[in-house]
Image (tube, grey):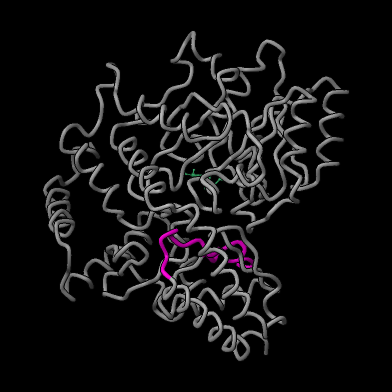
Amino acid sequence: MEASMKNYNEVYEYTQKVLGIIEKADVTQEEAQWITNETVNGFRENVNAGFLDYRKSVTKGGQYASVEWKDAGLNCFVDVNGKEYIDCLGGFGIYNVGHSNPKVIKAVKDQMNRQPLHSQDLLDPLRAMLAKTLAMLTPGDLKYSFFGNSGTEAVEAALKMAKIYHSEEGRSTFIATTRAFHGKSLGSLSGTAKGVFRKPFMPLVNGFRHVAFGDIDMMQKTMHACQLVGEDVAAVIVEPIQGEGGVIIPPDDYLAKLRQLCDDYGALLIFDEVQTGMGRTGKMFCAEHYGVTPDIITLAKAFGGGVMPASATVATEKVFEKLFDNPFLHTTTFGGNPLACAAALATINVLIEENLPQRAAEMGEYMLNGLREAAAEHGDKVLEVRGKGLLIGIEFVSDEIGYEVAKGFFDNGILTAGTLINAKTIRIEPPLTIEKEQCEKVFATFAKVLKEVNKSVLV
Ligand SMILES: *Cc1c(COP(=O)(O)O)cnc(C)c1O
């Protein structure tokens, strides 16, 4: 009864109106107002009003209702009212090759015009070509790729690969690290470290332990204890540099020692490079800084070039061969679809053509120094500015100051990452294509905002 009473006319009219808006590159003031109202109301009534509270926490005045609209060059975007922002958040690391990179867009459009999605049954060419490209590109003997649509899916695949690899031996213990972030689906959430994200969803996947990131002794003791009690470790999963945790860089020899430990105990090593991969830290993959090759690497975020959602789980033959007998043991309908593969292939092409990992190293150095200089006289507010390449964190002495600085940046047309849970460290993670002049605007704004914080929060 209820269902048949729904007014399809109303739905049709509404979708027709929205399609008319999508068509437009630019909107009138009146349309902008309509879009803003529909967006805010839609979030309140049908998405999640909590997002509005979050936006209020990182913006001043009515700016929480800023609605994004279009990209403006590689490093900026524009809201529906025409205000331009330098993107220093980079979508939490999705825009390594910039916003709307023309080469990525072209590849996706060309593929879209020919065939957007595949039959699901015949052999699809781009999946093979992207897998071959990754075998050539990734460190060491990583060779076979499974494709998904998101970071959490890449991590799920990695965990399942580790399980099936050890299935005969029955090993199923995983070690992750404190402050780790691996995603929010039930498997990857088991590896994620943050209590607030995990607690409401207990019990998670069995067999996960967390040890302090960067502490190799504790890792060794835990692996040893697991062995003693007959719960041998199947795999250790780490981000080579922790992103969400607040840009935590491990001791220089940590990852090499971790590799050795895993070999000694017969455990696999998984590097979650969802955020550190694709040039972000100044090398194509963060693992290269440390000369360590994992058994499995996960990629997502920037992997689709900021145009398509795409992820990959790349493993050595030794690990991946367990899936040869029955490739249907782990599948996903949209993973490795032609649009995503086209985007990833173009992204890798652009990263190499423009030498973007090297650029990330250089601009990262420039950004780090500039931010440190701006913070120099504000030791009472800024604890540390740290980073590698263009993965940079600014740690404040308190959450409140972090919120104030994020607000100040936003007010001045610079997007950074403050979070509802913790603004103590805000991340600076712009496209690797960011220009010097744009960095200078960031430095000047940071200095100015830090001065203003004095008046509002410290008193
Ligand atoms: C963002 C992130 C994920 C999760 O990716 P989603 O696409 O949001 O599922 C996993 N691991 C790391 C290191 C990340 O930064």
Name the quadrant of the C terminus.
Answer: bottom right
The answer to whether residue 199 of the structure is visible from this angle is no
Location of residue 267 with respect to 286 vertically, above or below? above
Q: Quadrant of residue 202?
A: top right
Q: Position of residue 35 (x, y in %)?
A: 24, 66
Query: Residue at 43% across / 43% down in the picture?
Result: 303
398 horizontally vs 4: left or right = right
The range drawn in magenta is 417-435
Location of residue 128 with respect to 352 vertically, above or below? above
404 horizontally vs 434: left or right = right
Query: Is residue 430 on the magenta stretch?
Result: yes
Identify which residue, 246 or 351, lies in the foreground.
Answer: 351
Identify which residue, 421 or 253, lies in the foreground.
Answer: 253
Query: Residue at 61% across / 38% down in the picture?
Result: 271
Residue furthest out toward the top: 325
Location of residue 220 with respect to 240 vertically, above or below? above
Q: Position of residue 434 (x, y in %)?
A: 42, 65
Location of residue 283 with respect to 443 vertically, above or below? above
